[in-house]
Image (tube, helix red, strand yellow):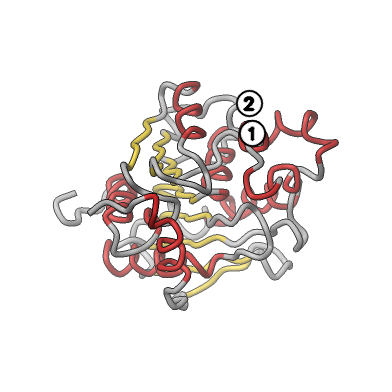
Amino acid sequence: MPETASAGGAEEAALLGLAPVAPSAGERYGPHPSQVIDLYGPPGAPLVAVLHGGFWREAYDRAHLSPLAAELAGGYGLRVALVEYRRVGGGGGRPGTFDDVGTALGHLRGVGELRALAGHSAGGHLALWAASRGLARCPVVAVAPVADLARAHELGLSGGAVAELLGGEEHLAARLPEADPMLLPAPDPGVAPVVLLHGTEDADVPVELSRRYAAARPAARLTELPGTGHYAPVTPGTAAFALSARELVRYAGVRHLGV
């Protein structure tokens, strides 16, 4: 059965109810406590990076995606770099959040060849931003991304989270062009091809945002997940998660379950 709109709260509870999984190793890319990367899977396995969501706020950290990282490593043969970054309320927002993503991706070049970059929700926005900035020179898989910051602000998503990220309502007009994937140059499809996965029943980040991005960026590929909400695509054990994992596995060049 597909995950349904009425199960949105159940989806969130299912994800947040999973016990965090400790990484097998870690890397620091700066002195701040949030400037850390957790590594899952054996060295030498194909490396993918993951950016978590939470509307860029300090209240949400990488722990909720640790089961995803562990499953991608143990079940799909990947080396997963789960990236933490400074967030609003903890030294982040503009410019710290953006600086950290760029620095972390640069640091990962010393860990191995990055085969793909994935991001969920606000992390999907940051992955698209990195692709447009030329910081991600690999395929990008954006899952339920906040792909259109201006429209997200118009919709009032998460109580004004976009304005918080960019330093306040008074700075939006000046700062959106440097932060909004819709206003930045389109990623080079020969360097950073973009895939978007978005549930049609996503009540947290409406699928409209990904549709707008795909319409403006014809090289991007959008796959809509019927009857699926915001959290199922990053919750191990769901059909939506299996689809997300297959995209990463395909780009990473791993043979798994016929992929």
Left/right of residue 3 with respect to residue 62 in the rendered view:
left
Task: Please name the residue that numbered disc 1 is placed on.
Answer: 180
Please tell me which residue lies in front, 190 or 241: 241
> Going 51% across and 46% down the picture, which residue do you hit?
124
For the residue marked with disc 2, what is the amino acid? Leu
Please tell me which residue lies in front, 129 or 16: 16
Percent position of residue 75, x then y: 27, 66
Q: What secondary structure is found at the residue carrying circle 1?
A: loop
Percent position of residue 176, x then y: 71, 32
The quadrant in which the N terminus is found is: bottom left
Residue 207, picture quadrant: top left
For the residue marked with disc 1, what is the amino acid? Asp
Q: Are marks 1 and 2 in contact (CB under 8 Å)?
A: yes
Left/right of residue 166 with respect to residue 256 in the rendered view:
right
Residue at far front of view: 6
> Going 44% across and 41% down the picture, which residue do you hit?
140
The CA distance from mark 1 to mark 2 is: 5 Å
> Going 34% across and 66% down the picture, which residue do you hit?
73
> Going 55% across and 41% down the picture, which residue do you hit?
146
Disc 1 crowd, CA 10 A, few/some/many (<14, 14-19, 20+): many
Please tell me which residue lies in front, 258 or 7: 7
Q: Which mark is residue 255?
A: none
Q: What secondary structure is found at the residue carrying circle 2?
A: loop
Residue at far left of view: 258
Left/right of residue 71 with respect to residue 202 in the rendered view:
left
Task: Please name the residue that numbered disc 2 is placed on.
Answer: 183
Disc 2 crowd, CA 10 A, few/some/many (<14, 14-19, 20+): some
Percent position of residue 230, x then y: 45, 51
Residue at far right of view: 170
Percent position of residue 139, x then y: 41, 40
